[in-house]
Image: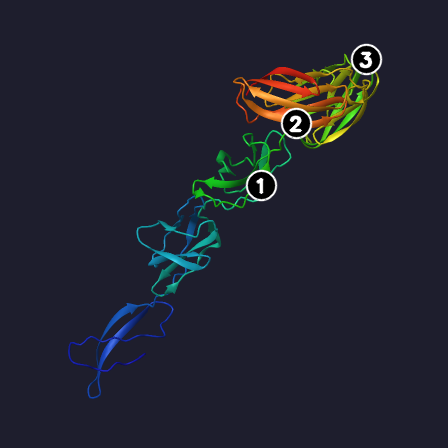
């Protein structure tokens, strides 16, 4: 006998709980008992206590890592004594699935985006929890939009462009390169981390940012970096004699900072000619200057340019040069110009003509004179009055700028002492 229960009224249901059951099945019998008449007839039945799942095997556990909305976990299990499966992420319960209809099960979890987590399946019945499987947990990841792009850098030393670079993001399939002002410049592939902005205006500074994109969305805008395309004519250079004449003097130019597109030579013999390097042009403006120029400015990052040639069959001596903010003397054609003998008569040479937007008046003055230049439009209206005051005897160059004037024909009247001369000018924009 393992216990007794009090009697009740006839027909009442009774219950007895065996709190110390045998580990195996046992036969339970119930007897009626009377203090007067003793034991009645028995009625027996087999019974066995239950337990938490112990032999349930969960297999083929897989968790996705390519979805933007959720992580989906699938598994296989055949466990007769299991009522449900609990889904755990990093040991935290995130969902339950009834153990019906197997052997294949699935569950999708709206996990935090961008953070991987280890998933396990735990079998459960009324008596408790089984062992969480697999061990170690199966990793799953909900994809997220890219994070901030870092390492953004924009150049400020190049003459023809601004180069933008950044650090790759593993989650980015594409990048948007943005400029302020200017908006989105381009979209490039996810394996690219550099972009050349050829549309930047020389001398202007822009703020460049890069934003990552993938199928889950657009990343946040990172802090940008300022970049500048250098303006031509600003910078310094070294100008060096490579071979000496006569008849030919060859020079090289090494830009040490900024961007340069013009080399000016002064003090040379009458009859000196010039030959330019590839991509450059050479213009001889009387006895005033020889100007080498190019439409593609040279920067400090570029190679040394050689091939600037001055030619004269007999002359030798010291000349002068100017490139951007640098200048100096060179061994070359004999000095003339400012270092030559004083002129014996008044004269005016205008160069270049036609022009846009600058031209020069080269004025020879044999004696100190009050000097003035008046510029008229084709209707005879005075558009510029330039008074230079009393200029000393010698050769003088005066610049005239027409950036504020419309294209067309103009007339310049140069007055020096009793001398006057009128020249036709053509401004072409």
CB atoms at circles 3 and 1 under 8 Å apart?
Answer: no
CB atoms at circles 1 and 2 under 8 Å apart?
Answer: no
**Residue 98 position within the rendered picture, expressed as x and y whole percent measured from the top left:** 32, 55
Label 2: state its secondary structure: strand
Residue extending farthest to the front is 418
Q: Residue at x 45, y 59 (%)?
A: 91
210 or 212: nearer the viewer = 210
Mark sitting earlier along the chain (3/1): 1
Mark 3 crowd level (few <14, some 14–19, many ≥20, 10 Å Cα)? some
Would residue 249 be found to the left or right of residue 178 on screen? right
27 or 257: nearer the viewer = 257
Mark 3 → mark 1, Cα distance in angstroms: 49 Å
Q: Residue at x 76, y 14 (%)?
A: 272
Question: Label 2: which residue?
Answer: 387
- The image's mark for residue 226 is 1
Q: Is residue 120 above or below residue 360?
A: below
Q: Quadrant of residue 253?
A: top right
Q: Is residue 353 visible?
A: yes
Mark sitting earlier along the chain (1/2): 1
**Residue 186 position within the rendered picture, expressed as x and y whole percent measured from the top left:** 49, 33
283 or 308: nearer the viewer = 283
Q: Nearer the viewer, mark 2 or mark 3?
A: 2
Question: Label 3: which residue?
Answer: 247
Mark sitting earlier along the chain (2/3): 3
Mark 1 → mark 2, Cα distance in angstroms: 43 Å
Would residue 27 be found to the left or right of residue 416 on screen? left
For the N terminus, the image quarter is bottom left
Would residue 188 be found to the left or right of residue 248 on screen? left
**Residue 403 position within the rendered picture, expressed as x and y whole percent measured from the top left:** 57, 26
For the C terminus, the image quarter is top right
Mark 2 crowd level (few <14, some 14–19, many ≥20, 10 Å Cα)? few
């Amino acid at each position: 006998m393992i216990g007794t229960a009090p009697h009740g009224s006839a027909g009442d249901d009774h219950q007895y709980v065996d709190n110390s059951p045998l580990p195996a099945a046992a036969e339970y019998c119930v007897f009626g008992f009377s203090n007067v008449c003793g034991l009645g007839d028995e009625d027996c039945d087999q019974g066995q206590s239950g337990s938490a799942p112990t032999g349930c095997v969960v297999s083929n556990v897989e968790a996705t890592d390519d979805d933007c909305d959720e992580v989906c976990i699938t598994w296989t299990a055949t466990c007769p004594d299991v009522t449900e499966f609990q889904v755990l992420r990093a040991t935290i319960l995130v969902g339950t699935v009834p153990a019906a209809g197997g052997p294949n099960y699935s569950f999708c979890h709206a996990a935090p985006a961008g953070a991987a987590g280890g998933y396990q399946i735990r079998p459960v019945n009324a008596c408790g929890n089984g062992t969480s499987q697999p061990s170690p947990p199966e990793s799953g990841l909900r994809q997220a939009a890219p994070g901030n792009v870092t390492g953004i850098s924009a150049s400020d030393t190049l003459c023809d462009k601004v180069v933008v670079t950044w650090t790759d993001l593993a989650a980015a399939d594409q990048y948007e390169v943005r400029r302020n002002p200017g908006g989105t410049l381009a979209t490039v592939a996810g394996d690219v981390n550099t972009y050349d902005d050829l549309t930047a205006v020389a001398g202007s500074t822009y703020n460049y940012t890069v934003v990552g994109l993938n199928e889950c969305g657009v990343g946040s805008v990172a802090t940008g970096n300022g970049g500048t395309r250098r303006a031509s004519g600003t910078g310094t250079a070294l100008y060096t004699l490579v071979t000496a004449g006569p008849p030919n003097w060859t020079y090289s130019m090494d830009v040490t900072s900024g961007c340069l597109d013009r080399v000016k030579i002064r003090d040379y013999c009458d009859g000196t000619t010039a030959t330019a390097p590839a991509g450059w042009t050479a213009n001889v403006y009387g006895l005033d200057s020889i100007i080498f120029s190019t439409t593609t400015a040279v920067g400090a990052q570029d190679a040394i340019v050689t091939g600037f040639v001055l030619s004269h069959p007999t002359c030798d001596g010291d000349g002068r040069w100017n490139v951007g903010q640098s200048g100096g003397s060179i061994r070359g054609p004999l000095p003339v110009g400012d270092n030559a003998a004083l002129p014996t008569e008044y004269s005016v040479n205008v160069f270049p003509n036609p022009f846009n937007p600058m031209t020069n008046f080269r004025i020879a003055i044999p004696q100190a004179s009050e000097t003035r230049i008046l510029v008229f439009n084709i209707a005879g209206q005075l558009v510029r009055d330039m008074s230079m005051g009393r200029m000393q005897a010698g050769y003088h160059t005066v610049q005239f700028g027409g950036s504020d004037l419309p294209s067309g024909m103009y007339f310049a009247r140069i007055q020096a002492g009793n001398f006057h001369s009128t020249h036709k000018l053509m401004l072409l924009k």
